[in-house]
Image (cartoon, helix red, strand yellow):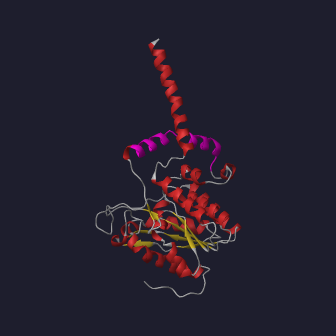
Amino acid sequence: MRYKTYAMRLTLFAFALPLVAFGLHRLGYINTENDFILQQQLKKLDRSRDEKIATLIVGDSSAGNGVDASFFARQCGAPALNLALTAGYGIAGTFNMLSRAAAVHPEIKNVLIVQSPDMWHRPFSLTGYFKTRIEPLANMKPILPQIRSRYIAYLFNVKEINWYAKYLFDRRRYRYDTANDYTAQHEKRFADGQARIDTDRTIPPGIPEERVQMLKRLDRFCYEHALNCIYLHGPMHESVLKNSTAALKEINATLADTLHAVRYIPTFFPVPPQKLGDKIDHIDPRFKRWSTRIIFERAKPFLHCRSKPIEHF
């Protein structure tokens, strides 16, 4: 009898875990830094409804930390909005944020897509896609089979409990750095000599097919909405780029084969550690205008801007 009671309790516990995970999911708690930046960028998009945006900046944290929207707007002579997420959301998150922004701001002329080279080798993030999506799941069938069953698995993902518990016990509170227009960076930074990496660190080759398919969807979206979309590589620690020749060739070959409506700039953006923040693709906030200037100059031949002299600083 004792074993039956134990087995029953174990069974109930096994059924309860997914239900608890589903409840936490539906309550929409901010359990990770990825959740936090998504919420902040969606709020920013909502606050911008009464503005006329000429340039949209999307991508990952290399764009969030590397492109100053206000400074970029002054260079181009028209308002700009930075809605960058993180590499955890991948190209799927970038596509979904572009879709959301285009629905709110049909007047957008330029779209700057800035992704870290380090993003391409990472596994495709279903969680990142589901968290940001606004389209029917059926639209993803050509890219991901069994998309509905995967969505159900996402809704009942027991990792949600682990993320929430970690957040509670760590008592961390993510902070939005208003001056940097992005999540606040950690105190240890390359620019201050506190953050370091192995000298042989590389970006491994290998790009998941799902990422390529999402890139095709993004390219088609830009074509169908007549958007002037420009893809640029985000800033990256110079030694990592130097060590990653094979991966960089693969990334550029994939972009060249996949992008047709989107103009892409194949030049990579090596950054000395003295200008990096808390990660290998995060510009230190003190140098954000510097990196913005470089990105603007690279995109400038393809941008629709007003005739206005570039500011000096």
- Image quarter of residue 189: bottom left
Q: Residue furthest left?
A: 193
- Viewer-proximal residue among 164 and 8: 164
- State whether residue 172 appears in this view: yes
Question: Residue 114: image x %, image y %?
Answer: 52, 68
- Viewer-proximal residue among 144 and 281: 281
Name the residue rendered at 44%, 41% in the picture: 162
Q: What type of secondary structure mainly makes up the magenta span? A: helix
- Viewer-proximal residue among 113 and 26: 26
Residue 69 relative to residue 106: left or right: left
In the picture, the quarter occupied by the C terminus is bottom left
Question: Residue 239: image x %, image y %?
Answer: 36, 68
Magenta run includes residue 46: no
Q: Is residue 87 above or below residue 163?
A: below
Question: Residue 242: image x %, image y %?
Answer: 39, 69
Magenta run includes residue 149: yes
Name the residue rendered at 46%, 50% in the picture: 32
Q: Magenta region: which residues?
A: 144-168
Name the residue rendered at 66%, 64% in the picture: 104
- State whether residue 207 appears in this view: no
Q: Residue furthest top?
A: 1
Q: Is residue 80 above or below residue 136?
A: below
Residue 208 relative to residue 149: left or right: left
Question: Residue 36: image x %, image y %?
Answer: 49, 55
Residue 183 relative to residue 128: left or right: left
Residue 149 relative to residue 188: left or right: right
